Amino acid sequence: MIELSTRGVVRFALSGPAAQRKILRDYKFPDPEGAARARYYRDTFRVIGDYHRYRHDTAWLEERADALEVMARNAGGAIRSRLHSNAAAIREYQALLPAGHYALLAPARLALSAHGVRVRVSPELHVLDGNREMLIVLLPGDKVTEEEARLHAQIVCEAADQVGLGISPRNVVALTLRSAQQFSATSHRVRVRRDLDAALQNVSALWPSIAAA
């Protein structure tokens, strides 16, 4: 079984042929640096989870962002950049906060399987918003496109359907922190589902021909 992350599938679906082969090569022959890039926003996700879990006030989020900035000033190179980016993402989430806190549910560790490909799916938040059960993908950074966000939401929706979670597609959302936009899995669902299925078929077809660099 071929195994990719959600982010990998989204990048693959939106890339040209040469970049697609590079993406698959990185998954077929992984290196530690790739794993580190995948965890780039781990501080942001941890802080946001703790904000809702312990029902902190918004000043606490600002304090956490300030603390990361202090750490960044004492760091160098890639670590400094990562800490600055996480501090910015926390402040962007703070500006988008809903009224009140979400009630956190158990983390959703899902997988989407199709065409011999298994996609690891782990939305950042699995919550109750009033009586609505929701799965929320958080997308930090300044280069997140609308199509990327829609694909993220659709992959989570399809994975939830496969295990029978019973969450409505309108309650599966991708939230872009920098541009403050929210995309549910209901929007353009037929087209996005078709594009996702085509991408997974293409992954399966290309995989045997991918050789080490």
Image (cartoon, rainbow, N blue to C red):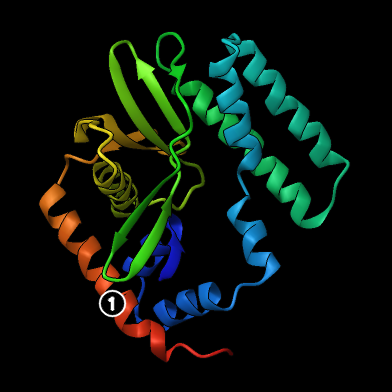
In screen coordinates, is 176 left or right of 28?
Answer: left
Which residue sits at x=37%, y=18%? 128
Instruction: Determine the image quadrant of residue 60.
Output: top right
- In the rendered image, the quadrant that contains the N terminus is bottom left
What residue is pinned by disc 1? 202
Image quadrant in which you'd find residue 62 = top right
* Whether residue 14 can be seen here: no
Q: Residue furthest right?
A: 74
Residue 100 rendering spot, x and y as whole percentages: 44, 8
Q: Mark 1: which secondary structure?
A: helix
Compared with 109, 70 (above or below) is: above
- In this image, 49 relative to 121: left or right? right
Horizontal side, residue 28 vs residue 183: left or right: right
> Which quadrant does the C terminus fall into?
bottom right
Residue 75 seen in this snapshot: yes
Question: What is the count of numbered marks?
Answer: 1
- In the image, residue 64 lies at what x, y percent? 70, 24
